[in-house]
Image (cartoon, rainbow, N blue to C red):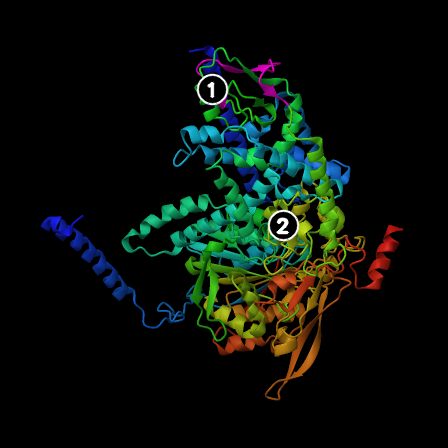
Amino acid sequence: MPYDKISRRDFMERTGKAAGFAAFAVGGAWMLHEPVRRPFDRKDDAPVSRDLRVAGVEDRLMIVRGEDPAKMAAAAITAFGGMSTFVQPGETVVVKPNIGWDRRPEQAANTNPGVVAEVVRQCVEAGAERVVVTDITCNDPKRCFNRSGIAAAAREAGAEVQLPQEARFREVNMGGEMLGRQDVYDIYLEADRFINLPIAKHHGLTRATLGMKNLYGILGGNRSRLHQEIHHSLVDLAAFLRPTLVIVDAWRVLLRNGPQGGSLADVEERKMLLASTEQTAIDACAGELFFDMTPDEMPWLGLAERRGLGTSVWRDIPTEEITV
Amino acid sequence: MPSSFQRYRRLRWMRRISQGFFLLLFFYLLLQTNIDALDSPDEVPEISAPVELFLELDPLVAVSTVIATHSLYRNLFLAVIIIVGTLFLGRFFCGWMCPMGTINQMIASMRSGRLKGKQRLESNRWKSYQNWKYGILAFVLGAALFGSLLIGFLDPIALLTRSMALVVLPAYNVLTHDLYSWSLYADLGPFSILLTPIAWVVHAVLIRAETVVFEQTFLILLIFIGILLANRIITRFWCRGLCPLGALLGVFSKTSILGLEKRASLCTDCNRCAMHCQGGDNPQPGLTWHQTDCHLCMNCVASCPESGIDFTFFPKREETTQKVSLTRRAVLTTAGAGVLTVPLLRAATNPDRTPDPSLVRPPGSLPEREFLSRCIRCGECMNVCPNNALHPTLMQAGAEGIWSPMLMPRIGYCEPTCVLCSQVCPTGAIDELTEEEKNWVPPAGKEETAGPPLRIGTAFYDFGRCLPWAMGKECIVCEEWCPTTPKAIYFEEAEVITREGEYLYLKRPHVDPALCVGCGACTYACPVKGAPAIYVTAVGETRNTKNRILLEQNRGRAAEER
């Protein structure tokens, strides 16, 4: 077509369209242009921590002996004035037993299901809106939750049992000495209260895994790196998430081949349970009672003390011995 | 309008409903390839649905494993249902049941861009390429005669199961996980309230709690896409020309008593039957109908307005052939080629002769030769593995073993109490096991009486990468994860002098090969990213008495056998 046939309107339309797209391209390039790419600069990098203790509750330590794990847990909670001391109606409580391994209750690698169920029941009775029982397991979660007996017991007691879901980890800056950005399971960032329910058992690296070591189970990602500076890492975790209550199950104690065990020959029936609002003291007490360890042999205690997370001399805090 | 027309339209709808049903059933079973959440420590994790049903109904799997192994494993006898049906009715499986056929037909039926008019009519005419599938069948059965099950590459049910389980479902899984993650944490300002219902919906359609990845998926995907796209040029090209199962059923359909009867006197040569023909078998009067290529889709009779063709029992066989138009010589030559291929494949290095160190087979796997005479590469074991530990091989098991399962512990380890792969294996390449037979963790209280575990390999340290050995750092995560009792990984306490001249006490790990089962949990958990500081090789595997390091392991085994 000869160009002299083009109308003015046609000319305006065509050049207008072209100019519009051109302006869009230039403007877009201008706006999106980034002179230097710094992928590691993050604006939302403020350290996060979660202190879920109840204000005004005096730190005490309960040492319970008895013939039934559930009743022992109940007695310990009663000694604190009942679960209503810790849980108010409408709150979301996350209860974290150790469900790390595909082992049966009698192999003592996971928290006793009777203790878990009792704690859940008390939270429900105290009026908690949601009681979530979860753990980031090592073995296949379905198998761990089932074989430990915890899924069934907790569900029956009224808990919402959550198997870990990949999409629900959030990377947060813990702001610790060792631990910076870590993948944390989201429920720990949202819950109002957190009850830590470890089992006392043997561990190859730290000799014993107790309360603070149980906090491993809030992490996803490459958590096995934490072993390199295990003591500092434990304290960072303990400072990041301060529990409302810690109950250490020692109904059966795995003394060798931990933390998985497997053989009943490695398990000793201790028929005990500890409970405290003070997470350093309870680790010190459990280490001494079940593994004959002094605070010096549990270096994370001293570090925790220095960080203001409690005392490694558990006899310094009011202690009650209960037998049921 | 003749009454038969209405009847055939109803029959065509029944065929479509049947196809839909079996396609949905296929996907349902794929998604059920998993254990349910159980409620008691005493319950044994089991798969609730017959997830390998389609593979067990597949006559090609049954026939070829019978040829290769002289036995019919577990539920493979179910294929008799299809065989008997085909002997009397013809290839109803292809037209009414086969999920691969249904997907091909769906792609072929999409109207946009499909061949039209004369071109389409020409593409639907019977052509000699439709004999290729018999060649493929003869070839793979010939190989089976020599004990090598090559059918798995092209058996449509194995191919579809593999493509879906290893490529399509994982991709869906990634998509839904990304969406779910986004809906949980996105910040849309005032619109953020919309995210909650989206999260509910996406959560409801999630198929796994975690995303899974597989090796070799690109190759598997390319082949699958190629098969699907071929339908845009020739309707059901795969079914007509390549499918070895279709060929086998074609051979069985030679005795069919149901057939097409042509009434040339009623035919007006409108060619509508041929336009809609799925099998390319020449339904129109005037040409020879190929019974062995007919899928009984009923499209021809349902589109014939004149009753010029009719499906009847014991039809008049004018203008019909029930033969497969292949010479005996061609069949024998191709089968012979199949037979000869096997020694050719085995003349290359192969796991039977020189076990590839990385080829760790799932627990319960038969010795390599027998394994390859049974494995159809369906991917069921990889689909069911809770830890995403099993992956298709490329050349680790030689060309003969492409896409057979191997353990990749960097991605996932073999779950100590899990025997699901052995339970879903339709052909017994992985022999069905119980937790007690695998015996990695003896049942509580039976530690003394339990026999030796079923080993799949042995772990080794790369001391140059191991933190306590090479870098003066505490670690022993491997020891923590080691599932055996007592642990196969133990450590020595070592005094180390640091770069600054300070003394440091470290726990340095070792493997006890007499206790290691080869699960790979140590490799999986090893914090050294990239190449791990501890890796598993197949040496020490129970299934291969020659693949050993330790002398006493053999002696112990012989003692047990006595």
> Quick check: B186 left or right of B384?
left
User: Is A188 drawn above or below residue B63 in the view shown?
Assistant: below
Name the residue that disc number 2 marks.
Answer: B403
Identify the element where label 2 is drawn. Answer: loop
Residue at 71% from the left image edge and 31% from the top image edge: B328
Residue B85 lies left or right of residue A17; in this view the side is right
Residue beneath disc 1: B302
Q: Determine whether, in the image, residue B52 is placed left or right of residue A216.
A: right
Label 1 or label 2, whichever comes before in sequence order: 1
Q: Between residue A95 and residue A240, name the one nearer to us.
A: A240
Q: Callout 1: few (<14), some (14-19), or many (20+) C-alpha neighbours within 10 Å?
A: many
- Height in image: B96 above or below A23? above
Please determine whether, in this image, residue A281 is positioned above or below residue B440. Answer: below
| Residue located farthest toward the right when viewing the structure as drawn | B562
Rendering quarter of residue B244? top right
Q: Residue B270's quadrant in the figure?
A: top left
Residue B166 shows in this picture: yes
Q: Is residue B310 magenta?
A: yes
Q: In the rendering, which numbered label is found on residue A142? A: none
Figure quadrant of residue A115: bottom right
Chain for numbered disc 1: B
Give the magenta-colored segment's residue range: B299-322
Where's residue B373, x and y in %? 73, 44
Badge 2 local density, few (<14 within 10 Å), some, or many (20+)? many
As helix, strand or loop, the secondary structure at mark 1 comes to helix
| Viewer-proximal residue among B136 and A79 | B136
Identified by mark 1, the residue type is Ala
Q: Residue furthest front?
A: A2
Chain name for mark 2? B
